[in-house]
Every structure is written in C-alpha cells, then in structure tokens.
Image (spheres, grey):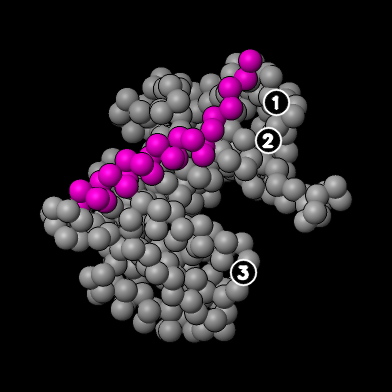
C-alpha cells in the first residue's frame, strides 16, 4: 500500500516546535522574531503565498509585516526598501516574493539583501555556504523535502535521488543539500533537465524521485520503479468544469497512475507546500537567534 507523505501533518509538528522556541526566546530575551515580506505587483498567486506565510508567522508568534510596491515601481525604489529593511532591527528576516516584474533585475535585488536576513537562502553568500555545508539557512522547499522524508522515516543516506528540474529555487539547492555528508543527506544525486536524453531510463533508477518540472502529470507510471518514493513539487492548474472555480490543482506527477506502484508519494496540494512555509519559520527564528549571537 502506498503511503501518503502528509506535508500538512508534518509541518504542523514543526510549527509547534517553532512556537515553543519563539515563546522561549521572548521569555528569555524579550525579543520577538520579525519577518518582512516584500511583494511587488499584483500577481494573485504571489499575494496568496505572502498571505499564507504571514498567517503562519502569526500562528507561531513571529511578527510579520508585508511591504507592497506597485508593478510599475522602479528597481531603485525596491532597492531603497530593501536597504531600509536591512537596517531595521524589528525584522530579523526579509523575503522577496518572486517572481518580480520583468523590468526588475532579480539577481541584483537578491544580492542587495543582508545575507543575515536572507531567510529564503537565495543570496550568493548563503548559496556558497550551503555548497560547503556551512549555511545557517536552508532553502525552504529543499529543506522542506528533506524534513518531510526524514521525519517520516525515509532516509536518503546511500540512496539514489533523482531530481527532475534544475531551478535555482528547488533543483540546484536540493542537489547540493542531498550531497552533504550528513545522515539526513549523503545521497547519490542525479539532476535531470530539458537537455536530458531518455529521461525515463534515469527516473526508473531512482530510489527517491523528486519532480520539479512545472508541467502537469509529466512523470508517468512507466517512468517510476516499483517501491520508489516520489516527491511532487509541482503545482499546476488544469481546467475542470466540475469544480466551482473551473480548475483543479495537480502536480508534476500523474498521481492516479503512480499511486499504488510506489512506496510513498506526496499529494498535491498538501505535500511539499506546507513544508516550504514551515522551513521559512525555522529560518526566521534562526535569523533572530543568530542576531543574538
């Protein structure tokens, strides 16, 4: 029987741990961890993500505030806002909700952020430290995947982890994380992408298969070996007239075709998404403690 890796339940455990840590921090130091979220433009999905992150902060006792800029704001205006948040002691963490409007340079924006407040772990300095296994912060989705596996009893130690996707947010940092010489990593990692020849021949060799492609149901049952563990990072909208909204959410994996064949799989929604937010909370309190030395 295939086990569903319930991200909601696992993330709730992490949130309870964070809430206890926040309470101790406030009691012992009088300092409340603070998170600033920067939202540029009016993209509905980005607005939902920021709202969910802020709500999660409130539930564990982290102070959160959202700073909004219009879609026609200039690069200079955004950088000025980042500079002000870098110097504001009320905020221990700052996240820049991506994507930014096309006229803005995301690389320069991220580099402008104080690395000690980079709770998304996207600053070049933190990515370099992650490569060396020395980063205080772990990128949200890769860290969430790691915790979801470990906390549900699935070790990556010595396993073949195949990652489909090489984005800077998921694929690349997850590969770095899984390669570290630690008991919760220590995997043999293969990264597949649009230039990969004969993708099924590689995915069928995976002990743990991570799909972060951005295409609905791209991973079919014939691409997954029996007994594998499948982590579906994708969130895609497909038309569905039977739904009130006219669409439903599916992952990058053909769930109905794969379930029953594999040992464990994450649902969409309710799998990786809640874990990503939970890791943001972990990074925020880490930033607060780091400030205290």
Q: Is residue 4 magenta?
A: yes
Q: Nearer the viewer, residue 83 or 259?
A: 259
Q: Secondary structure at mark 3?
A: loop
Determine the residue positioned at 77% across, 56% down.
245
Classify residue 10 by image quadrant: top left
Instruction: Indicate the position of residue 137 as horizontal and vertical percent values.
Output: 31, 49
Quick check: 38 above or below 235?
Answer: below
Q: Is residue 157 left or right of residue 223?
A: left
Q: Residues within 10 Å of mark 2 (few under 14, many from 20)?
A: many
The alpha-carbon separation of the residues under discs 1 and 3 comes to 33 Å
Q: Is residue 290 visible?
A: no
Q: Determine whether the residue tagged by mark 1 lies in a helix, strand or loop.
A: helix
- Tell whether position 273 is magenta: no
Examine the rendering and report whether any part of residue 234 can be seen: yes
Q: Is residue 230 above or below residue 242?
A: above
What is the tally of numbered marks visible in this picture? 3
Callout 3: few (<14), some (14-19), or many (20+) C-alpha neighbours within 10 Å? some
Quadrant into which the N terminus falls: top right
In this view of the protein, which residue sits in the foreground, 198 or 64?
A: 64
> In the rendered image, which residue does mark 3 sit on?
43
């Amino acid at each position: 029987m295939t086990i569903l890796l319930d991200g909601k339940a696992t993330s709730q455990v992490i949130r309870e741990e964070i809430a206890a840590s926040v309470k101790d921090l406030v009691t012992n130091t009088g300092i409340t961890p603070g998170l600033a979220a920067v939202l540029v433009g009016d993209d509905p999905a980005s607005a939902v993500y920021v709202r969910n992150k802020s709500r999660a902060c409130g539930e564990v006792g982290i102070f959160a505030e959202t700073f909004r800029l219009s879609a026609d704001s200039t690069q200079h205006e955004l950088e000025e806002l980042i500079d002000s948040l870098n110097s504001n002691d009320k905020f221990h963490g700052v996240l820049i909700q991506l994507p930014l409007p096309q006229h803005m340079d995301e690389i320069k924006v991220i580099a402008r952020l104080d690395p000690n407040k980079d709770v998304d772990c996207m600053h070049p300095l933190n990515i370099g430290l992650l490569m060396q296994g020395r980063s205080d912060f772990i990128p949200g989705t890769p860290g969430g995947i790691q915790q979801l596996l470990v906390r549900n009893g699935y070790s990556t130690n010595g396993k073949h982890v195949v990652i489909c996707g090489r984005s800077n947010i998921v694929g690349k940092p997850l590969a770095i994380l899984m390669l570290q010489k630690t008991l919760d990593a220590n995997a043999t990692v293969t990264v597949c992408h649009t230039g990969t020849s004969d993708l099924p021949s590689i995915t069928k060799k995976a002990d743990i298969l991570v799909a972060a492609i951005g295409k609905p149901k791209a991973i079919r049952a014939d691409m997954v070996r029996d007994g594998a563990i499948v982590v579906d990072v994708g969130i895609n909208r497909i038309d569905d007239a039977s739904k009130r909204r006219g669409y439903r959410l599916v992952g990058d994996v053909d769930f109905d075709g794969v379930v029953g064949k594999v040992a464990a799989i994450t649902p969409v929604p309710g799998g990786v998404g809640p874990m990503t937010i939970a890791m943001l909370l972990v990074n925020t309190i880490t930033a607060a403690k780091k400030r205290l030395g």
